[in-house]
Amino acid sequence: MKFIPYSEASKHDDVVVVDAYLPDKLNLSHWRGVESPPHLKADTSTEIVLRALVETPEIADREYCTCNHWDIDGFLGIWALHNPVLAMAGKNLLISMARLADFREKYGDDETYSAALSLVCYLNTLESEKFYAPFEMEAAEATVCLPKYEYFLEHFSGYMASEITFVTSEHLMVKSHQDRMESSGQMMKYPEIGLAVVASPTPLHYYALFADTADIDLVLTMYPGNRYELEQKYSTWVETTRTSFPRLDLSKLANFLNELEMSDQHVWVGDHFTETGPLLRISTNKLTRAERFQSPVNREILPSLISPMMMQMAIVEFLRNCYQGIQPKNRWTWEEVRQFNDSITIW
């Protein structure tokens, strides 16, 4: 199978589109609204590809495959199409890697997850050192990602076969932050509104912050000095097998918090629900998508005048009012999400 640029894929009938979308093609993607074969539905695009290799193994005989960006989930799906036998032998590791990279969640047994964390951090490091960091070249991503695919398709099989643990500075940071979360962090979950409240002495890497949130849609993180962030996870931007509440336009919640804040120096800003990972935070400048993608440890988190107890109570009460009478489900359409947000009249 040959990987071809996304811009050329529409010219070919015999093409598999992974973690993206093209009309009238075979799309193996978890993107919301993409018509992948229903019996192949799964949480990540990598898992959809792995299911396709089992259900319709002849898919590996197609001539072309493509994707319009490089990320680990998309890449692993492409790699699996190139290496179906190796992919099926290592499918648990691939699934763990895809969920960690896309959703920042822990998946699989301890041995599998440990190997996945090592490999994901190693791929992240190589991506930034040899090419560019995620979203740094967003406008031209479909074209400039091609050298990434060439490089990693050539080398990843060797990484999978290696029995060593790839130690990078990111890997060491995640392990340290996981220990910190275990020793001095706290997590309280409100499953009835899909919220987790995490208290931590310092900002954390996403792989530590979101590790145990597979059943959660929103994460409110609280740091000393009245510093807070709330994020809607990427897992609700895509279609998964999970149930969730419809995404919330965080600007509505920002308006409510600004009434509590009562300060021109502390302004809450919330992203629209169409962002891949919408953030709510006090900010003087709008973050770029590349900055939002980076872990909280890499960005400044400004203090609020709202006390931690008041902040937690306000968020919980706001969400309870928003989701009153709403039943969680999977596969919310964008139109349904828009209608839900248009219906919010509280505060």
Image: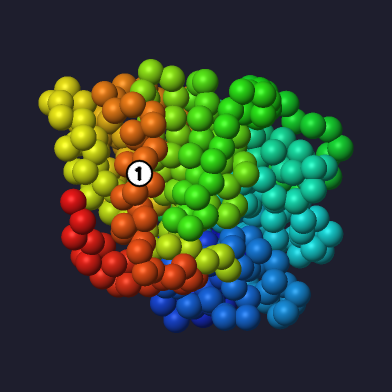
Q: Among all residues in the image, which is located at the extreme left?
A: 264
User: Toward the viewer: 343 or 231?
Assistant: 343
Q: Residue at x 80, y 63 (%)?
A: 88
Is 120 rendered above or below residue 75? Answer: above
Q: Position of residue 44 (x, y in %)?
A: 59, 60
Amino acid type for the residue under numbered disc 1: Ile
Instruction: Locate residue 102 relative to residue 168 in the image: left or right.
Output: left
Q: Coloured how?
A: rainbow
**Could you tell me how many numbered marks the image carries?**
1
Local crowd size for mark 1, using a 10 Å CA cut-off: few (<14), some (14–19), many (≥20): some
Q: Position of residue 197 (x, y in %)?
A: 48, 39
Q: Residue at x 54, y 41 (%)?
A: 188
Camera-side residue: 255 or 237?
Answer: 255
Q: Quadrant of residue 256?
A: top left
The picture quadrant where one finds residue 261 is top left
The residue at the far top in this view is 225
- In x, y percent, where is residue 121? 64, 34
Locate the N terminus by quadrant: bottom right
User: Is there any visible trace of residue 127 in the rendered image?
Assistant: no
Image position, residue 272 (x, y; %)? 28, 52
Name the element at disc 1. helix
Whether residue 39 is visible: yes
Q: Which residue is the site of mark 1?
A: 315
Tell me which residue sits at (17%, 22%) in the image. 265
When the figure is inspected, residue 54 is found, relative to residue 250, above or below; the finding is below
The answer to whether residue 43 is above or below residue 23 is above
Drawn side of residue 226 relative to residue 343, left or right: right
